[in-house]
Image (tube, grey):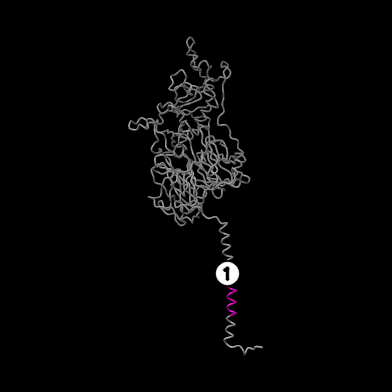
Amino acid sequence: MTTSSDLSPTTTGWRRGCGGVLALSVLGLLMALMGWWAWWRWQTALAVTPRPLEPTPTIATPTPSATPSPSATPTATAIPTATATSAPLPTAVPPALKPEEGVLVFALQDGPWVQLFAYHPQKARWQRLTQHPHDHLYPIAVNGGRHLLLAANPNGEWDLYLFDLGTGRTTRLTWEPGYQAAAALSPDGVWMAYEGYTDDGHLEIFLRQVQGIDDTPLRLTHDPAADYGPSWSAQGRLVAFVSTRGGTPQVWVADLDRPEVERFHQVSDPEAGVVVGEPHWAPNGRFLAWAQRKDGLSQVRVWDALHPDAPPVAVGEGSMVRWMPDGEQLAVVVRRPEGDFFTLYRWPAGLALPLIPLPGRAYGWAVGVTGLQGPLPETLARAARITPTPLWVPVVVHPQDVPAGRTVTVRIADVEAPYPFLSDAANEAFDALRAATRERLGWDLLAGPLTLFVPFTNPQAIPLEQHWLSTGRAFALDPGLLDSGDMVVLREDYGPDTYWRVFVRVREGGQGRPLRGLPWDFAARLDPLDPRAYTAGGAWAPQPPPGDWLDFTALAEAYGWERLPALSYWRGFLPAARFNIFVLRQGLSWEAAMAQLYPEKVWAVPQWLAPGTPTPSPTPTPTP
């Protein structure tokens, strides 16, 4: 039996050493097991965690503390950085519009004013939201879709308003005199970019705090050209907009992290046509979409900020582009001569919806509106219950000596015209349009001089079968308004057809807005030093003219008066452009309209000019 006295110091140390080695061995084994377990978890995580496919674009990399510096430095809160991802690849056909993404709100021409209407394609139901005696333009959804940020002119001045969809109340955000519209919100909701009119007559982009002590706007652009339609990227450091500084409307991007001399660069290709809609950033801040019209086709194009030098990708037909909140679909308005339509494209390719007709011309629209999920507040519910009254009601007088199916011409009071008559089926529509135009312009445009009825026996500048003025259902504005500067026209090509959009200058007491885009200058064709303008029938004006303007074409359409396409030879013969003629067609062909005034044998030229055929008296007798 060994006692403690028998253990020498050496023996005792060896045993203690063996115990220490054993303890270290166990500890090492445990550490090895823990290391292997951590390595296995790390490998498992790598197997399920996606890695970035591409680096964040240099052009769009935000600096959270950096702020825009046009002329002063705003102190916005930090803007969250959104990591750009690759283009989503649809694996299955998604629903055309997801219910959780909210509804669409359109600003549509509704009679003399532009009102707000809500629509959901899956429910196929329109709902009126406003019925005010003023316009509502360029709405966008903010604050999670619970509010709309829009421009309105209830007191004659254009300002920005916050429209609460839960209560129907509006809050005025700008108080400067003049024009402020088409706002875009920064990702943190602190700043907004918008277009505004300067004292020197330029349309520029401004920045300002939405709410704050210092709400003095900062001017972002200073070019003499027109700059309008801003869109703020998700990273908060890029603002896209349309500018005419390159000669025609094109898309430019302002990098707020660069000095002013390096801040602006063009991203659209002028060879792809003229930009016809403001740009719109995708939710991830990587893709920028807009619309360009060339050779009669308006195409949606998407630019990739990760590859800024790559040409934009064409998606499909469209004029006003919006990214849906999921970033996987592009919602567009397709503009046609006969009206506007709505549809969706899946990104990067694929049509999601057939064309849906809009009940009026669109002046902007918002996606992702969620504030209309429950019962409407009483303010909006009252507007939704309204059934608008007709803008005019025809009162047809039918004398006994007029054959059935025919009508007469009636005198139009207080107009300066060679023949102050219109068809009895059109005079009330003309009077109603005249009253609305006078209110909006501040002067009586349709008092003349203008052309109303023209007897078809008078010499005609264009073939009779194209001369709607002989039907009593048309009028022509005075071409001299172009020379006086009170009227300009914008050219719109649809396929092989050329149409014109007429704008008339607003005087004191009227309600208009600055002109977007460049007018068409017919007089440029007379310049002997510009043969290209001669063969093209004119040229784009170098800059939009200053002042406030009324879209007379849109107002006339609201009252039933349609414009006509130019005849094929308009470039060499100005009357064939027909830019100033408006027709109350009401679904009638020219022959059917003529038959309402005359028997067919009267205006069928080969018959009544045939040898031996007596020449009738073609001019209808005006009825007081």
Q: Is residue 530 above or below residue 69?
A: above
Q: Is residue 64 magenta?
A: no
Q: Residue furthest left?
A: 529
Nearer to me, 43 or 472:
43
x then y, percent, for residue 516: 44, 39
Nearer to me, 281 or 74: 281
Give the x, y percent position of residue 332: 53, 40
Q: Which residues are magenta?
A: 18-30
Tell me residue 114's x, y (percent).
Answer: 53, 38
Question: Farthest residue toward the bottom?
Answer: 5
Name, please, the residue furthest toward the top. Answer: 612
Q: Is residue 374 left or right of residue 347?
A: right
Is residue 28 shown in magenta? yes
The residue carrying pointer 1 sits among few (fewer than 14), some (14 to 19) or many (20 or more) residues within 10 Å by Cα, namely few
Residue on which disc 1 sits: 32
Q: Which secondary structure class fits the magenta region best? A: helix
Q: Quadrant of the N terminus?
A: bottom right
Q: Amino acid at mark 1?
A: Ala
Residue for point 57% across, 69% down: 32
621 above or below 29? above
Between residue 242 and residue 142, name the one nearer to us. 242
Measuring 48% from the left and 12% from the top, which residue is drawn there? 610
* x, y percent for residue 290: 48, 42
Residue 66 in view here = yes
Q: Secondary structure at mark 1?
A: helix
